[in-house]
Image (cartoon, helix red, strand yellow):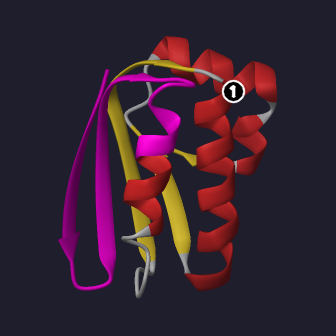
Amino acid sequence: MLNIAKNASADELTIALEGRLDTTTAPQLEDEVKGALEGVKKLVFDIAKLEYISSAGLRVLLSTQKIMNKQGEMIVKNTSDEVKEIFEVTGFLDILTVE
């Protein structure tokens, strides 16, 4: 189960994720993100309450990063130790801006 909360102001969008980002929930996030990026210059993923991320979830973050590279910046913040370790092992710490 994944809860997605979006908060937009001007050209900035914050997406807060809660739960598990896996094969089942990744398409849901992908749909939410794709419909919300127009005109966004700063995208922030707040993943303080994200318990787990699978390769499907990583793929969504990567494809979103590619879009944001063209139109602005993407930041991933409030990463738990578990998720940060997954980012480290997969090399995503070098790809994403993690705060």
**Residue with the mark numbered 1:** 55
33 in relation to 62, above or below: below
Q: Is residue 48 left or right of residue 37?
A: left
Q: Is residue 25 left or right of residue 87?
A: left
87 in relation to 17, above or below: above
Q: Is residue 19 magenta?
A: yes
Q: Residue at x 36, y 71 (%)?
A: 36
The residue stretch that appears in magenta: 1-28
Residue 63: % across, % down: 67, 56
Residue 80: % across, % down: 43, 20
> In this rendering, does residue 99 appear at all?
no
Q: Residue at x 21, y 70 (%)?
A: 8
Residue 55: % across, % down: 69, 27
Q: Nearer the viewer, residue 32 or 14?
A: 32
How many numbered marks does the figure carry?
1
- The N terminus sits in image quarter: top left
28 in relation to 18, above or below: below
Prevailing SS of the magenta stretch: strand
> In this rendering, does residue 5 appear at all?
yes
Q: Is residue 2 left or right of residue 25?
A: left
Q: Is residue 23 magenta?
A: yes
Q: Could you classify mark 1 by the number of other residues whose Cα lies within 10 Å: few (under 14), some (14-19), or many (20 or more)?
A: some
Q: Residue at x 41, y 80 (%)?
A: 40
Q: Secondary structure at mark 1?
A: helix
Which kind of residue does numbered mark 1 sit on? Ser
Q: Residue at x 43, y 74 (%)?
A: 37
Residue 28: % across, % down: 41, 43
